[in-house]
Amino acid sequence: MNHTLLSAACAAAMISMPAMAEVSISLGSSAPTYGTTLNFDEVGGPTGDFISTDAWSGIGIGSLGAGDGNTFVGNLNSTPGFGWLPDNNVMVGNFGVFMEFSTDLTSFSAQVWDNGGPADFVSGGMLAVAQKDGVDVATYFWETPVFGTGGDNWFDITTTDGSSFDRVVFLGFAFVSPVTIIDNVSFNTVPVPGTAAVMGCGLMLAGRRRRA
C-alpha cells in the first residue's frame, strides 16, 4: 500500500463512527473498579459539612453535591442507626446526590444506599440517571433501595462504542427526609478524540518510510 492510500485509510478510520450506541445502568452485588477512583478516604480529602461542590475537580469531577446544598463526608459507622455502613468515610446527600464531570465518561460505578424504601403509589424508590448535555441517556428505577440492610447496592453505568455521558444523579423518593449515601466511586473518561488512531497511523507510516 503506498503512502497516499495508507494515509487515506487512517483518515477514514479516525472519522468513522459506530451505527448504534447506548448507555446502560445496572444494579448488582458488585461492580468493576474503573481508572479514576474516589472513596472519600483519600489523604487530605475534605470531611465534614458543607463541602464545596468543586472539592474533587482535580480528579475530573467538576461538581459533586447534595440536593439540599449540604455536601457531607464522614464516617457514620459509630453513629446510632448507621452501624450497618462500612467503617470508613462516605458522602451523604440529603435530597439526592448530583455529580457533573469535566470530561465525558464511558463508564462509572459506585456503591449507593437510599432510604426511599419500597415504591408505592405515593412515594418510595430511587432513580439513577445518566445524562449527556442535560438530556437523560439512561435511567434505572430502584424499587426497593437498600438502607440499614444487606442487598445489592452497586451501580454500574457502561456504554457502547461512541456513546458517553457527563452527569450522574441518584435521587431518592422517601416521603420524609430523603437521604442518599454514596461511596467507592470510580469512572473512565472518553479518550482524547483520534489520539489512538493518530498514534497508530504515525507508527505505520514511520515503519513504511524506514522500509522504503
Image (tube, rainbow, N blue to C red):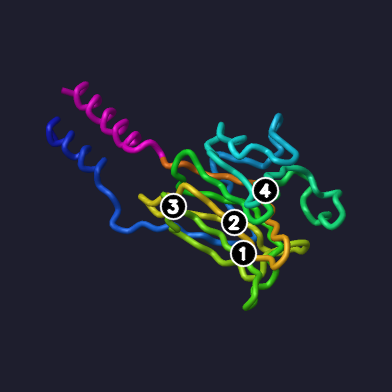
Mark 3 and mark 2: span between their CA atoms? 15 Å
Mark 3 and mark 4: span between their CA atoms? 24 Å
- Placement of 15 over or under 174, stated as above or below: above
Q: Give the labeled residue for mark 4.
A: 183
Mark 3 vs 4: CB contact within 8 A: no
**Residue occupying the point 45% across, 50% down:** 165
Question: In the picture, which quadrant includes the C terminus?
Answer: top left
Residue kind at label 4, given as amino acid type: Asp
- If you read the primary sequence from the N terminus, does the residue marked by circle 2 or circle 4 appear first? 2
Q: Give the labeled residue for mark 2.
A: 170
Mark 1 vs 2: CB contact within 8 A: yes
Residue kind at label 1, given as amino acid type: Met
Q: Give the labeled residue for mark 1.
A: 126
- Placement of 150 over or under 104, stated as above or below: below
Residue kind at label 2, given as amino acid type: Phe
Mark 1 and mark 4: span between their CA atoms? 16 Å
- If you read the primary sequence from the N terminus, does the residue marked by circle 3 or circle 4 appear first? 3
Mark seen at residue 134: 3
Query: Residue at the bottom extreme?
Result: 121
Mark 2 and mark 4: span between their CA atoms? 12 Å
Q: Which residues are magenta?
A: 191-212
- Placement of 3 over or under 185, stated as above or below: above
Query: Foreground: 90 or 160?
Result: 90
- If you read the primary sequence from the N terminus, does the residue marked by circle 3 or circle 1 appear first? 1
**Residue occupying the point 62% across, 70% down:** 143
Mark 3 vs 1: CB contact within 8 A: no
Q: Give yes or no for residue 208 being in the magenta stretch.
A: yes
Mark 3 and mark 1: span between their CA atoms? 20 Å
**Residue occupying the point 50% across, 49% down:** 167
Q: How far across and how far down the image is residue 205, in percent?
A: 22, 28
